[in-house]
Amino acid sequence: MTKWWQNAVVYQIYPSSFQDSNGDGLGDLNGITKRLDYLHELGVDILWLSPIYKSPQVDNGYDISDYRAINPDYGSMEDFDTLQKKAHSLGMKIMMDLVVNHTSNQHELFKQSKSSKDNKYRDYYIWRDGKNGHEPNNWESFFTGSAWKYDDVTDQYYLHLFAPEQPDLNWENPAVRHSVYDMMNWWVNRGVDGFRMDVINYISKTEGLPDAPKSFGQKYANPEPLVANGPRIHEFLQEMNNNVLAGKDLVTVGETPAVTTEEALKYANIDGSELDMVFQFEHMGLDNDPITARWTDKKAKLTDIRANFTKWQKQLAGKAWNSLYWNNHDQPRVVSRFGNDKTEEYRVLSAKMLATMLHFQQGTPFIFQGEEIGMTNAYFDKLDDYVDLDSINAYHKIVDEDKQLDGTTMLKYLGMRSRDNARTPMQWDDSDYAGFSTTTTWEKVNPNYKQINVKNALSDENSIFYYYKKLITLRHNEDVITNGAYALVPGNENDENIFAYTRKNEKTTLLILLNYTDMELNHDYKIPKDAEILISNYKDEMRGTLRPYEAKVYKF
Ligand code: ISL
């Protein structure tokens, strides 16, 4: 039986950058409400709102100080109700971002916890004594520096896997877990339809919090092996499921760095015991460097992309459910990263080709705002233009502290991989501030907004927008996209330029042919005589040849 979210498409809204309605340069809820008709026209089913809760905004809302209040800069609870009501009336569901590995250090519970060792909320967070005048262990924060912060009020350290302003909650404490479930139920009772759960597989840490294996010459070590998919994670998620999700028709997706297919079979099992899907990260690391990780200009090879997608498609088939994504607020723009934004022609062709590659797989696709018009990286050339703490901290660590890269090279790599590339304001039209705002914006508008914007996309029937719209419609109408078996076309396994796969159910077969390159290529992948083109990014059909970035899907 198909579940409603299995043939749905999710659209992620980054509230700060979607639409400003009150002229302060920052997006807001009324801005989103104003643009719901646009999203309805695109045809998406679920709107995932990045955090809209009260927050000091150290990490753009991923540091929450009150989970039952709206960030005043985004509007009020009433504005939220209006948004939700209108979305529902247009047939779109609301998915909330749930950030419960950590809170803000301004959260009332943390303030209490910090106040004394015997405060009744002390154990809501992870406090430890120092070791010989040092941090309790060698873990490095994902945003650089030690993952521990010393607090002189009680002469102890608290754990923060992310920024010091994001203390980790202690999930070992049942009272913490139940207060999270209560809060989730509070939102469910307000009418929300699901949750995207931030780093949810980090909530169970290895007992004893031991040191992590250190790379040569580094002061701190990556704690991921000791915090991701930890010992009690499945117990916690099953408990959450029992207390909140079971018996309700919600949709959930866990953000799970370092997740393997084996783990995903538990998290996203179709028995519904934990979550509905997870975001896997493996395909987001295919262009990483062994030493500098994300900070590189390496391009991912098609052979690696195909091997990874194929592994996830095959290993989850019939047992668990995949999420499908190229983009979100943490990743650079897909067309700049895996496609080609050097010319207008290639930008449009490669954006459509990459969309085709993803949207014909089995799973639930996620579109990040602006992806549907082929927004590109911002390529800021000054450190001053960057706003994201992750990007700024990484620059200082890699250039000033570790001296692994010089400043110019690191700026180039930030231009390619920084999270800010995703976070520039949505480009609605060619007026000042791209129709996003009427004043200087919190993060700079990408200068290419005069050409790349929604208004232009809507007036061009060959735009990327209408291509995405068609992909969404096809998913709604063609069962095989939801339930068909995935297979590589025999002989395609090692093809470095063409990706060829099929989806097949009892009635229908789809053949997806994709040219990952800017070259014209001949191929001998067989196409049955009676096959019809379901969608393509070129107007005319040429059999036996794939033009630059050509994507075509045959149905037979
Ligand atoms: O952003 C990253 C680099 O691509 C990741 O390391 C990221 O920090 C990780 O995927 C977790 O992301 C989530 O939690 C963070 C928040 O900054 C991210 O925006 C969020 O998606 C802490 O809440």
Image (cartoon, grey):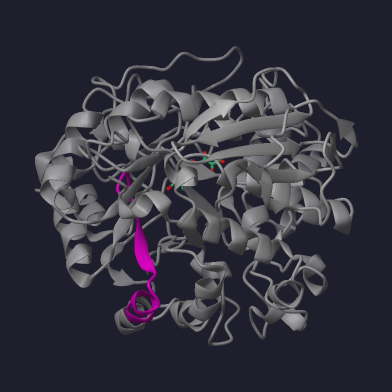
Res 45 → quadrant:
bottom left
Q: Nearer the viewer, residue 165 or 12?
A: 12
Determine the residue positioned at 39% across, 55% down.
63
On screen, residue 203 versus residue 409, left or right, reads left
Q: Which residues are magenta?
A: 85-104
Looking at the figure, which quarter contains the N terminus? top left
Determine the residue positioned at 82% across, 48% down.
541
Where residue 138 sits: x, y (%)? 43, 22
Where residue 528 sits: x, y (%)? 69, 34
Above or below for 191 versus 117: below
Where residue 275 sits: x, y (%)? 28, 41
Where residue 296 sits: x, y (%)? 74, 32
Res 488 → quadrant:
top right
Looking at the figure, which quarter contains the C terminus? top right
Magenta stretch: includes residue 103: yes
On screen, residue 171 versus residue 64, left or right, reads left
On screen, residue 214 versus residue 446, left or right, reads left
Viewer can see residue 373: no
On screen, residue 225 versus residue 203, left or right, reads right
Determine the residue positioned at 38% across, 46% down.
198
Above or below for 165 versus 492: below
Above or below for 461 versus 323: below
Q: Nearer the viewer, residue 485 or 147?
A: 485
Magenta stretch: includes residue 230: no
Q: Nearer the viewer, residue 376 or 411?
A: 376
What is the total number of numbered labels drawn onto the structure image?
A: 0
Res 49 → quadrant:
bottom left
